[in-house]
Image (cartoon, rainbow, N blue to C red):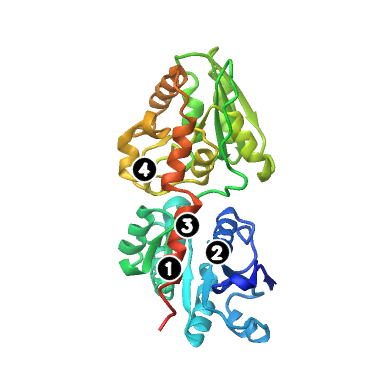
């Protein structure tokens, strides 16, 4: 257990951060951002990483945690909820869960491991409904996920609060666009269906516009296919590059080298409900974004158009539609970097996180 407190003289209270280590532990960007915002609001964060999720409420009896005002179970830690709920109820403190995803949605509709009508899928759904009811407050990263938690996982509407993923603003911040003879359009992320890199690769042959550089940064199962498509359908107007993953702390500078960033272009309901990390990060760096239209974005942001917001939404995520949109943006003379950053500040910044955290933590303890 580690004490991640700042100045105890200004501490408003103490949050017990309850979750096992894993791929998405304290170093996961969402978790780091929330912790940082809690510190800035004057809260002390006590990290508890149990050895076993199922018996963590027993394990913590042997730890000196002191007075706790709320328990926070972070991203993807559904398995930690039952023990955390038992401890929180025993100590009459608020239990907050920030799942980021639904395990049912991921296993059944994204990974397609089970048919929705199968016994395993229905059992997983019932289990997750029970789990989400254990929390006093459930965090959703978008309004669409809030609706999903309410409609599919039977959460009480008063139980769910939206907090955007946002970006780590000490790393992702704007800088002037370097003048480029050939503008660079940058895709960075995992090569999976949700991200839609195949759509981008297939758009290369259809592109008709000023010369551009199209860079794919990252890795994943669809990268070999994208490389094959790019090689088999060359276009003299598009310089294509594939780059491997770089250290996370180098990513902001790499984003700032680009003129425009590409979001996600996958099909399926989940693609419509999410705002991926890359969109927050690109906007925080002051880079315009082209991405698929999704219900997760504020309506006025979608309605106001690219020149007002720095964001271009594609209702039709076909290679032809993407090629035409990239060509239109490559031909535009207007610098949209300030508009992109203004969009980030208005809708997705750390200020929005701090405001929601203040609201949640001022509502008192669990009954």
Q: CA distance from mark 2 to mark 3?
A: 9 Å
Would you identify the image quadrant in which residue 320 lies?
top left
Callout 1 environment at 10 Å: few (<14), some (14 to 19), or many (20+)?
Answer: some
Q: CA distance from mark 4 to mark 3?
A: 21 Å
Image coordinates of residue 271 in percent, x first then y, are: 41, 45
- From the image, tell me which residue sits under label 4: 294
- Vertical comparison of 208 with 75: above or below: above
Can residue 345 be seen here?
yes
Judged from this view, the residue extending furthest toward the front is 9
Q: CA distance from mark 1 to mark 2?
A: 12 Å
Instruction: First in sequence, mark 1 or 3: give its number.
Output: 3
Give the SS element for disc 4.
loop
Give the SS element for disc 1.
helix
Image coordinates of residue 173 in percent, x first then y, are: 57, 41
Residue at 58% x, 49% y: name it.
168
Q: Nearer the viewer, mark 2 or mark 4?
A: 2
Instruction: First in sequence, mark 1 or 2: give its number.
Output: 2
Q: CA distance from mark 1 to mark 4?
A: 27 Å
Would you identify the image quadrant in which residue 3 lies?
bottom right
The mark tally for this picture is: 4
- From the image, tell me which residue sits under label 3: 353
Instruction: First in sequence, mark 4 or 3: give its number.
Output: 4
Question: Are the residues at dot 1 and dot 3 in contact (C-beta closer than 8 Å)?
Answer: no
Give the SS element for disc 2.
helix
Residue at 46% x, 70% y: name it.
361
Callout 4 environment at 10 Å: few (<14), some (14 to 19), or many (20+)?
Answer: many
* Viewport quadrant of the N terminus: bottom right
* Viewport quadrant of the C terminus: bottom left
Give the SS element for disc 3.
helix
- From the image, tell me which residue sits under label 2: 38
What label does residue 360 carry, if any? Answer: 1
Would you identify the image quadrant in which residue 215 lies?
top right
């Amino acid at each position: 257990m580690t004490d991640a407190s700042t100045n105890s003289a200004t501490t408003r209270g103490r949050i017990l951060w309850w979750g096992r280590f894993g791929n998405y532990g304290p170093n996961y960007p969402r978790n780091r951002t929330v912790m940082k915002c809690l510190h800035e609001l004057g809260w002390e964060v006590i990290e508890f990483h149990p050895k076993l999720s199922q018996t963590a409420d027993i394990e913590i009896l042997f730890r000196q945690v002191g007075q706790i005002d709320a328990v926070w179970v972070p991203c993807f830690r559904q398995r930690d909820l039952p023990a955390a709920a038992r401890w929180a109820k025993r100590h009459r403190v608020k239990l907050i869960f920030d799942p980021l995803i639904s395990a049912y949605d991921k296993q059944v509709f994204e990974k397609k491991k089970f048919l929705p009508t199968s016994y395993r899928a229905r059992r997983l759904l019932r289990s997750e409904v029970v789990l989400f009811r254990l929390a006093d407050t459930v965090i959703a990263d978008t309004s669409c996920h809030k609706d999903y938690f309410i409609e599919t996982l039977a959460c009480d509407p008063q139980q769910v609060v939206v907090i955007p993923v946002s970006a780590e603003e000490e790393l992702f911040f704007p800088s002037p666009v370097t003048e480029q003879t050939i503008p660079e359009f940058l895709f960075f992320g995992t090569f999976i269906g949700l991200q839609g890199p195949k759509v981008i690769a297939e758009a290369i042959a259809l592109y008709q516009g000023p010369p551009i550089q199209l860079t794919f940064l990252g890795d994943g199962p669809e990268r070999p296919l994208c490389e094959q498509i790019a090689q088999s359908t060359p276009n003299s107007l598009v310089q294509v590059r594939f780059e491997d993953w770089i250290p996370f702390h180098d990513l902001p500078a790499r984003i700032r080298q680009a003129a425009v960033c590409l979001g996600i272009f996958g099909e399926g309901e989940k693609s419509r409900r999410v705002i991926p990390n890359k969109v927050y990060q690109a906007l925080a760096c002051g880079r315009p974004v082209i991405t698929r239209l999704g219900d997760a974005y504020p309506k006025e942001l979608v309605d106001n158009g690219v020149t007002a917001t720095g964001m271009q939404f594609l209702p039709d995520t076909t290679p032809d539609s993407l090629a035409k949109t990239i060509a239109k943006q490559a031909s535009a003379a207007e610098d949209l970097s300030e508009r992109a950053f203004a969009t980030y500040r208005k809708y997705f910044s750390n200020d929005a996180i701090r405001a929601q955290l203040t609201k949640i933590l001022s509502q008192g303890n669990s009954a």
